Image (cartoon, grey):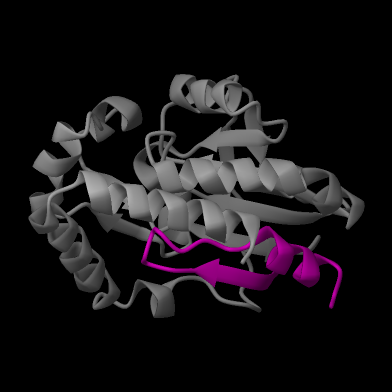
């Protein structure tokens, strides 16, 4: 079992011990509901060209896709927010794999709908050395076909867990991206994607590295 998978399994076990069964069931039901929407099938796929975009990074500085691509392959990671423990586990795993990602000739950039100050906080707390872009309103995530609205039944549960999505995102829409990872070549064409509506499932860094190395 990989390091990331082990850490996710350990967190799942702790969550199962701490949360009531009805809360766990509500979360599972919401995931099943999301799966029925067909987001995975509707989102951008291998061979699609990514529309150019511009977003601020964690310091408020504008970053354009065409500039990020340059001569390097781009790994674009969409995550829900710094409040999401699964996202944090994935970001930590990507940070550990970053030297190998760069050695494979790729650049890593993360995107979330959080406001830049929250993106900056996530970057600082996790000691990330790759850029984090702020996609307020999920405008870019929407062009990828990744956006959904958090179901009503989960909102009070999240609030009880101390998760205030409107405060993080700067609006009360409760819209989030499905976690996803894309490998995009220098021409802006998707060469690989990982999209899973089950937010507890993430792309393993070892698999990403195999893709980048052409294995």
Q: What's the magenta region?
A: 188-215
Q: Residue at x 76, y 71 (%)?
A: 211
From where the camera sits, is residue 62 visible? yes
Closer to the camera, 163 or 134?
163
Closer to the camera, 116 or 209?
209
User: Is 200 contained in the magenta span?
Assistant: yes
Task: Locate residue 121 relative to residue 66 in the image: left or right.
Answer: left
Quarter of the rendering occupied by the C terminus = bottom right
Quarter of the rendering occupied by the N terminus = bottom right
Q: Residue at x 20, y 58 (%)?
A: 27
Q: Residue at x 12, y 57 (%)?
A: 21
Closer to the camera, 86 or 145?
86
The percent coordinates of residue 6 (x first, y second) are 55, 57
The percent coordinates of residue 13 (x first, y second) are 35, 54
| Picture layout, residue 149 above or below residue 172 | below
Please identify the residue farthest to the front as the structure is shown: 17
The percent coordinates of residue 117 (x first, y second) are 47, 19
User: Is 165 contained in the magenta span?
Assistant: no
Task: Locate residue 23 relative to residue 48 in the image: left or right.
Answer: left
Closer to the camera, 79 or 15?
15
Q: Residue at x 15, y 49 (%)?
A: 154
Picture quadrant of residue 182: bottom right
The percent coordinates of residue 124 (x first, y second) are 59, 21
From where the camera sits, is residue 188 visible? no
Q: How many circles with numbers are drawn on the protein?
A: 0
| Picture layout, residue 63 above or below residue 43 | above
């Amino acid at each position: 079992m990989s390091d990331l998978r082990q850490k996710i399994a350990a967190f799942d076990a702790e969550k199962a011990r701490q949360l009531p069964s009805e809360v766990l069931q509500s979360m599972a039901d919401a995931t099943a509901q999301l799966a029925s929407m067909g987001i995975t099938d509707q989102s951008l796929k291998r061979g699609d060209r990514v529309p150019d975009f511009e977003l601020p990074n964690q310091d408020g500085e504008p970053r354009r896709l065409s500039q990020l691509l340059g001569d390097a392959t781009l790994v674009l990671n969409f995550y829900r927010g710094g409040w999401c423990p699964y996202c944090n586990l994935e970001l930590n795993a990507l940070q550990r794999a970053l030297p190998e990602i760069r050695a494979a000739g790729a650049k890593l950039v993360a995107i979330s709908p959080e406001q830049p100050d929250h993106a900056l906080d996530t970057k600082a707390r996790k000691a990330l050395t790759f850029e984090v872009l702020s996609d307020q309103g999920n405008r870019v995530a929407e062009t990828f076909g990744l956006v959904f609205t958090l179901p009503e039944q989960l909102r009070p549960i999240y609030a009880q867990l101390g998760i205030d999505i409107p405060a993080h995102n700067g609006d009360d829409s409760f819209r989030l991206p499905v976690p996803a990872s894309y490998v995009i070549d220098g021409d802006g064409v998707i060469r690989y994607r990982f999209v899973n509506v089950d937010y507890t499932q993430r792309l393993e860094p070892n698999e990403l590295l195999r893709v980048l190395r052409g294995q």
